[in-house]
Image (tube, helix red, strand yellow):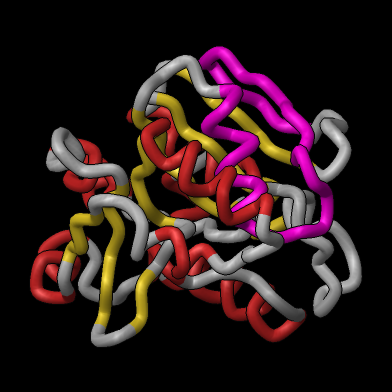
Amino acid sequence: MTSIILAGGKSSRLGRSKALQVVGNKSLIQWVIDRVAALSSELIIVTAHGEPVPHSSGIATRVVADVHPGKGPLVGIYSGLVASSSYHAIVVGCDTPFLNTSLLEHMAKIRTTFDVVLPRVGDKVEPLCAVYSKNCLSSIGSLLERDELSVLRLFDMVKVRYVEEHDINVFDPDHLSFFNINNEHDLERARKLAAEKGWLIADR
């Protein structure tokens, strides 16, 4: 299984690179790497220009560039899947420090006959905490050719398995896997959560 971390966003609301912001004792991207490493034989970090992102990892790591920089997560997913040596890949954002590995592992286990496996709470889906297959590449390619950049549009074109709220709650009852950093308030909240839950010590 490959894990793809999307780090090519503009971070316009935060005003600086999300990936390098520090929560406790490490950067956001290192938090994400530490969460997915146990599930991965390969790690791909997708950035806007293919520039290295400082991190440490005990698994094979590649940095690849968005094929169309600045056009959103659908392009990042496409770029990562093209580079992946695995048919299926976990896809997450670089700004989701509290990913639940048990939830990711569950989605990986039920991926077999599906092109995408992703969480859904009510009518809201989580496309950047999901498993994608290379079978999505042709559909994403068609969308990009038409400059249709919504990830949600992809789900009408491929075979999708949704993990519903009652199943999510078994693994991640607080839904912290879906908490991402968009602004200073989110960053401060992440620091408080990490301290309150004792993750700073556990992850040293």
Please state, as top left, top right, bottom left or bottom right, where the N terminus lies in the image: top left
User: Which of the pair 88/53 is nearer the observer?
Assistant: 88
Residue drawn where x is 69% and y is 75% of the image: 182
Task: Please state the extent of the stretch shown in magenta in the rendering.
Answer: 54-83
Residue 90 percent coordinates (x, y): 40, 40
Residue 104 percent coordinates (x, y): 29, 46
Q: Is residue 106 above or below residue 153?
A: above
Question: Quadrant of residue 14 in the image?
Answer: bottom right
User: Which of the pair 16/158 is nearer the observer?
Assistant: 158
The answer to whether residue 92 is left or right of residue 21 is: left
Q: Is residue 46 visible?
A: yes
Residue 165 percent coordinates (x, y): 17, 75
As for residue 52 lying within the magenta part, the answer is: no
Residue drawn where x is 21% and y is 43% of the image: 114
Residue 111 percent coordinates (x, y): 20, 39
**In this figure, what is the number of numbered marks?**
0
The answer to whether residue 62 is left or right of residue 117 is: right
Q: Is residue 28 visible?
A: no
Residue drawn where x is 51% and y is 63% of the image: 151
Q: Is residue 74 above or below residue 2?
A: below
Question: Quadrant of residue 191 in the image?
Answer: bottom right
Residue drawn where x is 48% and y is 72% of the image: 179
As for residue 60 lying within the magenta part, the answer is: yes
The answer to whether residue 118 is left or right of residue 188 is: left
